[in-house]
Image (cartoon, helix red, strand yellow):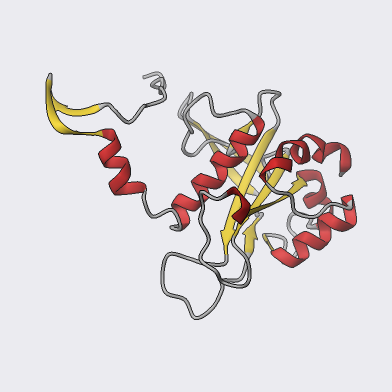
Amino acid sequence: MKQQKQEMKSGDEPFHTECTHAGFSLLDYWQWAESDLLNNTRRAIIAEFLVARAVGATDKPRVEWAKVDVVTPEGVEIEVKSSAYVQSWAQRGPSDITFDIAPRKETWDPATNETVTHNPPRRMADTYVFCVLGDEAGTVPDPLDLADWKFYVAATSLLNRERPIGQRGSDSIGIRPLAALIRKATGMDAVGFDGLREAIQQADTRQ
């Protein structure tokens, strides 16, 4: 069977029995399932949305398990990673910020339902965007407040050079080493949402 085409939903779509409206809608489901925005899974998807929005790639629904998280209209493939100092559960203090940058051995193509093996493993995207919600003070952030987000942009070529695949400790990177690596290579610090599009556009040429 071919991949089923997905269309953007409005939230007004009703649950129903054949043609009879059940009295509740897709929006009711979204409110029930998606309201905990600090949850790790929800926060990660919000981060992907913000990156996609910044580069103009929200015209189609998100594809789960795609090779990369976002593809710009120009074809730049982006891997989005997110973390936060404050979680939705009780904490003793702010969380440490660490990102997964491990290479992948396999990817799945939803259009063909085929798994592709990569030998040797590699980092798939052209560019990584590392999204950090909140600050070390531990104040509860609002994921809908763009001012509460910071974005660190690094070309994959930079990560491959500075954190070579297969080298000990190359599968993850903390926020301070990441910020120092980007600053050393590009002179750039984290950007806000308003500067995200330009930072992504310049990533490969800078690094």
**Location of residue 135 with respect to 205 vertically, above or below:** below
Q: Is residue 14 left or right of residue 169?
A: left
Q: Is residue 148 left or right of residue 22?
A: right
- Residue 199: quadrant of the picture: top right
Q: Is residue 28 left or right of residue 22?
A: right
Residue under the point 54% across and 78% down: 93
87 or 117, nearer to the observer: 87
Q: Position of residue 53 (x, y in %)?
A: 59, 34
**Location of residue 171 with respect to 78 vertically, above or below:** below
6 or 160, nearer to the observer: 6
186 or 100, nearer to the observer: 186
- Residue 202: quadrant of the picture: top right
Q: Residue furthest bottom?
A: 92
Residue under the point 12% across and 31% down: 22
Q: Position of residue 90 (x, y in %)?
A: 42, 74
Q: Is residue 13 left or right of residue 71?
A: left
Q: Position of residue 108 (x, y in %)?
A: 52, 35
Quadrant location of the C terminus in the rendered image: top right
177 or 162, nearer to the observer: 177
Quadrant location of the N terminus in the rendered image: top left
Q: Position of residue 51 (x, y in %)?
A: 62, 40
Residue under the point 46% across and 37% down: 64
- Residue 205: quadrant of the picture: top right
